[in-house]
């Protein structure tokens, strides 16, 4: 159970990108303690952003220093659409996204209730952490345009390929 619970993004898109930008501003390398003083975040928020960035392959951590990787630099220098493509390629490596996307693909209408995502998360995280983890998962999935969420109906929809292609042709 411990290993599975580690395979999650622990921070949202804006937190991770903000961390990467801060590291980039420091020449691609920053001391983890310096970040904590600079941004004044709680330690667990900072560690969540660092852990997520590391898991995504955007940074490495060596002897208290956080270093931007080539992938991290590529993400920062990319357009919004390029960033979305990079994230969309990474997310299915997380168990929660793999299961969610697999189920969405299998369902004829490509829709699941938000409750289903909560069940996936609830299998490996304590109940008090489910809501936050759900919000983070939905944040990344929406950013990458892999899913869309109907808040009124509490449903998660697979982003249809035709919709994406149609949007790209109109750009």
Image (tube, helix red, strand yellow):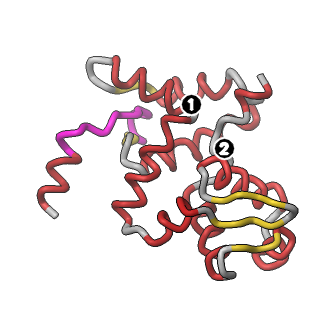
User: Up-down: is 77 above or below 120?
Assistant: below
Label 2 or label 1, whichever comes before in sequence order: 1
Q: Are marks 2 and 1 in contact (CB under 8 Å)?
A: no
Q: Residues within 10 Å of mark 2 (few under 14, many from 20)?
A: few
Residue lying at 38% horizontally and 65% vertically, measured from the top left: 80
User: Up-down: is 97 above or below 33?
Assistant: above
Question: Does the segment drawn in magenta span residue 157?
Answer: yes
Q: CA distance from mark 2 to mark 1?
A: 14 Å
The image quadrant where one finds the N terminus is top right
Question: Does the segment drawn in magenta span residue 110?
Answer: no
Residue lying at 48% horizontally and 65% vertically, measured from the top left: 74
Q: Which mark is residue 77?
A: none
Question: Label 2, on which residue?
Answer: 132
Residue lying at 33% horizontally and 18% vertically, measured from the top left: 107
Residue 170 in percent (x, y) is at: 12, 60
Judge left or right: residue 130 versus residue 143: right
Residue 5 in percent (x, y) is at: 72, 31
Judge left or right: residue 67 versus residue 78: right
**Where are the magenta residues, as a range?**
151-163
Residue lying at 63% horizontally and 82% vertically, measured from the top left: 25
SS assignment at label 1: helix
Q: Nearer the viewer, mark 2 or mark 1?
A: 1
To which quarter of the image does residue 130 belong? top right
User: Up-down: is 87 above or below 115?
Assistant: below
To which quarter of the image does residue 14 belong? bottom right
Q: Residues within 10 Å of mark 1 (few under 14, many from 20)?
A: many
Question: Label 1, on which residue?
Answer: 96
SS assignment at label 2: helix
Residue 144 in percent (x, y) is at: 41, 50
Nearest the eye: 139 or 101: 101
């Amino acid at each position: 159970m411990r290993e599975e619970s580690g395979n999650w993004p622990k921070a949202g898109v804006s937190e991770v990108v903000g961390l990467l930008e801060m590291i980039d501003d420091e020449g691609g390398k920053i001391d983890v303690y310096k970040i904590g003083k600079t941004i004044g975040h709680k330690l667990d928020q900072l560690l969540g952003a660092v852990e997520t960035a590391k898991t995504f392959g955007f940074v490495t951590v060596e002897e208290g220093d956080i270093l931007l990787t080539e992938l991290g630099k590529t993400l920062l220098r990319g357009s919004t659409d390029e960033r979305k493509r990079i994230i969309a390629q990474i997310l299915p490596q997380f168990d929660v996204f793999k299961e969610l996307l697999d189920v969405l693909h299998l369902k004829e209408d490509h829709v699941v209730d938000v409750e289903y995502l909560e069940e996936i998360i609830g299998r490996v995280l304590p109940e008090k952490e489910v809501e936050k983890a759900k919000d983070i998962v939905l944040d990344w999935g929406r950013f990458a345009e892999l899913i869309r969420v109907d808040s009124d109906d509490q449903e998660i929809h697979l982003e249809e390929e035709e919709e994406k292609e149609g949007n790209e042709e109109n750009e």
